[in-house]
Image (cartoon, rainbow, N blue to C red):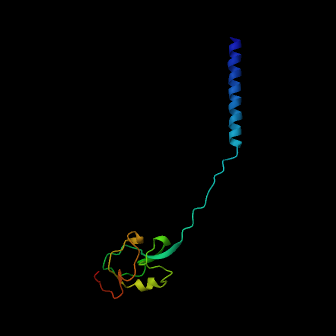
Amino acid sequence: MNRKLIIVGATAILAFGATYVFMTNAQNAAPARLMVQASPRIDVEQVLVANQDLPMGTVVSEGSAIWQTWPKAAISEFMITKSDKADAMEDVTGSMARVAFIRGGGGAPAASSPSLSGEGTLLSR
């Protein structure tokens, strides 16, 4: 019986020692290095968009429109950009929306003349 007890005790001590060595080395191992690549640069432009929902016929007040960053590849010729018309914010203030605009450009950004009437009257399409 003593021989069996000595073998079981020695096996337990060896298992404990091996586990201790393994865990100590695992904690001291250098962490894996992650390769991070920079994402490609996207050219952007400032586009005039509605700051709040503007139903058709709404007079655009100050603060109703803001400049929002937009990818240049997605800009159409009808969008109002800051580089083309930096004073567009003042031009659209007091205009009447001929079509509905959804806040933040969710539907479409503010477009040039077909969408806004400068005279404060609703124009037909």
Which residue sits furthest left?
124
Which residue is painted at 37% across and 71% down in the image? 102
* Residue 86 position within the rendered picture, expressed as x and y whole percent measured from the top left: 49, 83
Residue 71 makes an appearance in the image:
no
* Residue 117 position within the rendered picture, expressed as x and y whole percent measured from the top left: 34, 85
Q: Is residue 117 above or below residue 12?
A: below
Observer-nearest of 16 and 72 = 72
Which residue is painted at 41% across and 71% down in the image? 105
Which residue is painted at 67% across and 19% down in the image? 8
Which residue sits furthest bottom?
119
Observer-nearest of 113 and 102 = 113
Q: Tell me the quarter of the picture where residue 14 sits.
A: top right
Report whether 86 appears left or right of 22: left
Question: Quadrant location of the C terminus?
Answer: bottom left
How many numbered tags mark residues here?
Answer: 0
Observer-nearest of 122 and 71 = 71
Residue 105 makes an appearance in the image:
yes
* Residue 42 position within the rendered picture, expressed as x and y whole percent measured from the top left: 54, 68
* Residue 65 position within the rendered picture, expressed as x and y whole percent measured from the top left: 42, 78
Question: Quadrant location of the N terminus?
Answer: top right
Which residue sits furthest top?
1
